[in-house]
Image: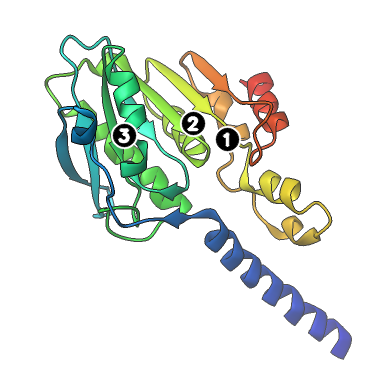
Amino acid sequence: MKIIFNLIIFAVFLLIYTHFLERKALYYPSKKIEFTPAELGLRYEDVFFRTADGISLHGWFVPQEGALFTILYCHGNAGNISHRVEIAKMFNERKMNFFIFDYRGFGKSKGWPTEKGTYLDAQAAYDYLLGRQDIDRNRIVIFGKSLGAAIAIDLASKVKAAAVICESSFTSTKDMAKAIYPLLPFWLFLRPGYNAYAKIVKIDAPKLIIHSQDDEIVPFSQGQRLFARR
């Protein structure tokens, strides 16, 4: 009985530690805003808005006269929106409005990131765009990169989008842990967080999956699985 009891205690400890490790390894927020779109000659609006659970978020809306579409951009798991100003310029030069926001805990956004929280953040960003009178709500393209792709897929599975673009997306955090630590069985205790693989089939919009064969972080095979699953 003592052995069984010790095994149960060890399993509980491993589950708690695994959950802690999952959160610490997933988010690398930076609070300092290092650049703005103005430094690349772009007009932009400093935007603050709130999520359904009351968290204040920060973002930039970069308008373009006669825009064909509006890009809602979900960035990756590190840094903040100030590290993506060149992406704003790229889309702006192609006649598109561009809206990028920081998840809770990133940049000027309040709170601390969690999976559920980032989903609420993306929904709030989408709702903010719906409330603007100067864009076509039927021409919102949801773009996500890396972790942001999993967040974009979740959002697009629940709202109307003109299209969805996923760059360097993983299938789930559990699959990523298995790929990074194939010889360490702790990933067996992980839930399939950010389960893009399960949600991508729920998207009723054109989908573009982009993934480099030379990606050194997210295995190319996971992009292939998402493309086949779409």
**Which amino acid type is shown beneath numbered disc 2?**
Ile
Q: What residue is at 16 percent from the left and 29 percent from the top?
A: 131
Residue 188, horizontal then vertical, whole percent = 76, 56
Quarter assignment of residue 129: top left
**Which amino acid type is shown beneath numbered disc 3?**
Val
**How many angstroms separate mark 2 from mark 1 (CA)?**
6 Å
Lower sequence index among marks 2 and 1? 2
Lower sequence index among marks 2 and 3? 3
Q: What residue is at 18 percent from the left and 23 percent from the top?
A: 63
Q: Is 123 left, or right, of 56 in this rendering?
A: right
Q: What colouring style does the render use?
A: rainbow
Lower sequence index among marks 1 and 3? 3
Indicate the secondary structure of the residue bearing disc 3. helix
- In this view, 204 is above or below 32: above
For this rendering, which residue is in front, 58 or 190? 58
Q: What residue is at 70 percent from the left and 27 percent from the top?
A: 225
Residue 13, horizontal then vertical, whole percent = 68, 77
Which residue is situated farthest in the left direction here?
Answer: 133
Q: Are marks 1 and 3 in contact (CB under 8 Å)?
A: no
Q: What residue is at 17 percent from the left and 40 percent from the top?
A: 47
Q: Are marks 2 and 1 in contact (CB under 8 Å)?
A: yes
**How many angstroms separate mark 2 from mark 3 (CA)?**
23 Å
Q: Which residue is mark 3?
A: 85
Q: Is 226 left, or right, of 4 in this rendering?
A: left
**How many angstroms separate mark 1 from mark 3 (CA)?**
26 Å
Q: Which residue is mark 2?
A: 153
**Which amino acid type is shown beneath numbered disc 1?**
Ala
Q: Which residue is mark 1?
A: 196
- In this view, 121 is above or below 134: below
Indicate the secondary structure of the residue bearing disc 2. helix
